Image (cartoon, helix red, strand yellow):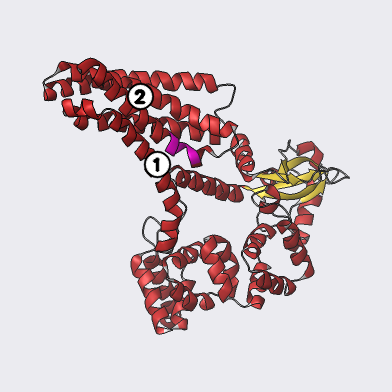
């Protein structure tokens, strides 16, 4: 190869090496190169920089850019890569990017996607954009997207891809392989199983592609098919994730109310579901929403104020309890220094029990069948932790205050509050779940309020009885 031919390749390789750190995160220096090119309006340089990135890295890059820079960068994304980039973008950023693309280019890109990814993109379009883009698409692709959007959001029907590889029971391995080779355009880009169907198009089994390729051509599919786990088209996405995790599935057929095969779900879809559900639960436990990298200050503040207001109300409840023992605190000033310790240790212990319980509910490890045993276990843990930590704190408090009775009071209060923390940490999410509320959203504030209330009440109440 000549030097002139090798130079562009070397330059592209150098850009790829510069783009990512060892942990596969984008280098800040590379982001700055893109920003500089956008500021100059240098489209050719932008295309060069974008071309050196994997579609997932381009999606990540768009998240680091401001709205103004995204407007400069989006038109220079190569059309052949646009189809792969759109599904990778965060929802808010994708909506913004979609507004920058002409309907014709977007329709062309959507035709390269599987029906599930195409439906997810079209869902983010404004109504007038959606009409224009769908009108520019071939009838078959348009119908597939419209059918997907007809299903409820966050259900298997909305998430599934309609393209599947199905074959009748009487087909041989050779017939199946020949069909795959001759009908490549009608099949999903990636699939793991051949679904074996009866004359009513109901799945009766599945043949993994790996097994198909290892079997002789004259063997019937009915002889090598395996049992299949079906998923109802109206199943919630949490149920889908649970089934995939429980049965270690790579793919699964989706069936309608009549049991007929209408699509399939694959493990890449489920990974996205699990990440989304975990992110929602983590944010909900803190009472916040996903702000995003370019969220506005006013919007973030507005989303957090309601929960802070609830916490303020619970804090006032704790302050009211303290006010009931104002006379005790005036006579024994040391109590004012020590009482936050009791409520703080209770709050932390309650959060531990709460987190474990919410996770167990989400993974269905905790049910009515074992709830009593789980409750008893957490009570035992709370008692053991109290007996381990309270005496140490009691000794420190007694030495510091010079009064062994204060040590006894804080010791007893810590043990009792840890028992209460364990109780509410389990019972609160269980009760909310039974009442059909999301335990991740509402539990934390109740647990904190309860441990603070009883922490102050027990500690100051015991101090009043023992010391006065």
Local secondary structure at mark 1: helix
Residue 52 as seen in the image, left or right of residue 463: right
Q: How crowded is mark 1: few (under 14 residues within 10 Å), some or many (20 or more)?
A: few
| Quadrant of the image occupied by residue 104 | bottom right
Q: Which stretch did the figure color magenta?
A: 442-446
Give x and y (percent) for residue 141: 74, 65
Question: Mark on residue 418?
Answer: 2
| Quadrant of the image occupied by residue 116 | bottom right
Give x and y (percent) for residue 439: 52, 37
Question: Mark on residue 313?
Answer: 1
Give x and y (percent) for residue 282: 46, 44
Residue 95 seen in render: yes
In the depicted structure, whether residue 64 falls above or below residue 77: above
Which one is earlier in the sequence, the residue at label 1 or at label 2? 1
Local secondary structure at mark 2: helix
In the depicted structure, whether residue 105 falls above or below residue 264: below
Taking the spot 73% from the left edge, 35% from the top edge, the residue there is 227
In the depicted structure, whether residue 447 falls above or below residue 46: above
Give x and y (percent) for residue 55: 52, 65
Q: How crowded is mark 2: few (under 14 residues within 10 Å), some or many (20 or more)?
A: many
Taking the spot 59% from the left edge, 76% from the top edge, the residue there is 101
Q: Is the magenta stretch mostly helix, strand or loop?
A: helix
Q: Quadrant for the C terminus, please.
A: top left
Q: Nearer the viewer, mark 1 or mark 2?
A: 1
The residue lying toward the viewer, choosing from 21 and 132, is 132
Residue 62 as seen in the image, left or right of residue 262: left
């Amino acid at each position: 190869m000549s030097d002139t031919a090798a130079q562009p390749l070397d330059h592209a390789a150098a850009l790829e090496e510069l783009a990512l750190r060892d942990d596969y995160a984008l280098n800040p220096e590379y982001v700055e190169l893109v920003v500089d090119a956008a500021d100059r309006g240098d489209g050719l340089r932008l295309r060069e920089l974008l071309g050196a990135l994997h579609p997932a890295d381009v999606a990540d890059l768009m998240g680091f850019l401001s709205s103004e820079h995204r407007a400069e960068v989006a038109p220079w994304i190569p059309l052949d890569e646009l189809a792969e980039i759109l599904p990778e973008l965060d929802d808010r950023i994708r909506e913004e990017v979609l507004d920058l693309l002409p309907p014709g280019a977007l329709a062309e890109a959507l035709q390269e996607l599987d029906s599930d990814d195409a439906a997810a993109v079209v869902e983010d379009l404004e109504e007038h954009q959606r009409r224009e883009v769908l009108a520019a698409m071939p009838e078959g692709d348009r119908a597939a997207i419209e059918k997907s959007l007809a299903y409820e959001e966050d259900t298997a029907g909305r998430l599934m891809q309609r393209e599947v590889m199905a074959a009748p029971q009487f087909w041989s391995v050779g017939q199946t392989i020949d069909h795959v080779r001759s009908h490549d355009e009608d099949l999903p880009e990636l699939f793991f199983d051949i679904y074996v169907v009866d004359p009513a198009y109901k799945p009766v089994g599945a043949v993994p592609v790996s097994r198909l390729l290892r079997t002789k051509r004259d063997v019937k599919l009915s002889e090598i098919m395996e049992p299949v786990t079906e998923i109802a088209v109206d199943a919630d996405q949490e149920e889908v994730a649970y089934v995939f995790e429980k049965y270690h599935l790579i793919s699964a057929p989706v069936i309608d109310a009549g049991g007929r095969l209408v699509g399939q779900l694959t493990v890449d879809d489920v990974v996205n579901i699990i990440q989304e559900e975990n992110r929602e639960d983590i944010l909900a436990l803190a009472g916040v929403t996903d702000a995003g990298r370019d969220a506005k200050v006013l919007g973030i503040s507005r989303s957090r104020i309601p929960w802070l207001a609830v916490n303020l109300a619970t804090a006032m409840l704790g302050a009211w309890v303290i006010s009931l023992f104002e006379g005790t605190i005036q006579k024994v000033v040391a109590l004012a220094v020590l009482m936050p310790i009791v409520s703080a240790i209770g709050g932390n212990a309650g959060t531990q029990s709460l987190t474990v319980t919410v996770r167990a509910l989400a993974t269905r490890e905790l049910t009515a069948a074992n709830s009593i045993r789980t409750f008893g276990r957490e009570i035992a843990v709370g008692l053991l932790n109290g007996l381990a930590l309270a005496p140490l704190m009691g000794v420190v408090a007694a030495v510091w205050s010079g009064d062994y009775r204060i040590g006894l009071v804080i010791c007893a209060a810590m043990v009792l509050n840890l028992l209460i923390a364990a109780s509410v940490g389990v019972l609160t999410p269980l009760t909310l779940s039974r009442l059909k509320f999301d335990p991740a959203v509402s539990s934390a504030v109740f647990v904190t309020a309860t441990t603070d209330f009883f922490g102050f009440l027990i500690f100051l109440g015991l101090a009043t009885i023992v010391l006065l």
